[in-house]
Image (spheres, helix red, strand yellow):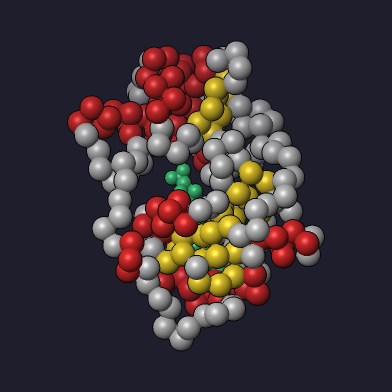
Amino acid sequence: MNGYPDNARAVWAYRGWSTYSYHSGFATPMNKRLITVSKFLSKHLRHEPEKLGLNLAPGGWVAVADLLAGAAKVGFPISREELQQVVAENDKRRFALDETGQRIRANQGHSTEVELQLPETDPPEVLFHGTVERFLDEIRAEGLKKMNRHDVHLSPDVQTAIKVGQRRGQPIVLAIDSSKMAADGFKFRVSANGVWLTDHVPPQYIRLA
Ligand code: HQG
């Protein structure tokens, strides 16, 4: 890995950085319910749609009516208003309604089989990946792998990558030479909420940010 010191440098400068998030971090009583709904939606729209009797259509879409019926059936009733509020206010725009408002999907983050129908897109010069120190040796050896998800997730800016890394501890931010990757034939897609997706990032394109 280029520019990789013996002891990986933690991003101490960002210590204490935190933000409001529906999935983690600071939660006021008022948004607690929406956090719970957001987690429920992530679970079923990304990972286990079958638990609500749902099949993801191409693009990851399910009918809102089916989702609400499935949720009620498993004892987690959600109102249409709550659903709309989560879609509109979710900190990372994790979910989207289609133009008719009758279908909903997770914008990214799936582990279940789904064709998201995102077009290949030229990436910016550099992309970022937030991780933690305990993964660095493996990342240095094997590059970034998609692990349990469909794709490797990359962030367009350092702040977002810090947030991603912080989910697991003291964040380490890696910079990815995405323009070089694209020139070498690697494909990139970008989700509706600005997460860059690719299949694998070999170690030679990775350095500490
Ligand atoms: C690490 C969240 C060992 C990788 C976030 C990461 C993001 C390796 C973890 C989205 C490795 C996978 C995705 C290798 C990668 N050896 N560890 N070769 N290659 N890793 O959660 O990128 O809140 O699947 O560094 O904000 O952390 O769900 O991916 O730590 O956008 O909407 O293996 O999930 O969004 O973890 O996060 P994840 P991620 P949501």
Residue 190: horizontal and vertical position, in percent? 64, 44
Residue 96: horizontal and vertical position, in percent? 54, 27
> How many discs appear?
0
Whether residue 23 is visible to the viewer of this picture, yes or no, is yes
**Residue lying furthest bottom in this view?**
6
Residue lying at 74% horizontally and 53% vertically, measured from the top left: 187
Residue 142 drawn above or below residue 130 = below
Q: Quadrant of residue 76?
A: top left
Whether residue 44 is visible to the viewer of this picture, yes or no, is no
Residue lying at 55% horizontally and 65% vertically, measured from the top left: 175
* Left or right position of 11 against 209: left
Residue 188 drawn above or below residue 66 = below
Q: Quadrant of the N terminus?
A: bottom right
Residue 146 drawn above or below residue 46 = below
Residue 83 drawn above or below residue 14 = above
Residue situated in front as seen by the camera: 146 or 22: 22
Residue situated in front as seen by the camera: 173 or 133: 173
Residue 11: horizontal and vertical position, in percent? 37, 68
* Left or right position of 148 against 169: right
Residue lying at 41% horizontally and 72% vertically, measured from the top left: 133
Residue lying at 42% horizontally and 14% vertically, measured from the top left: 80
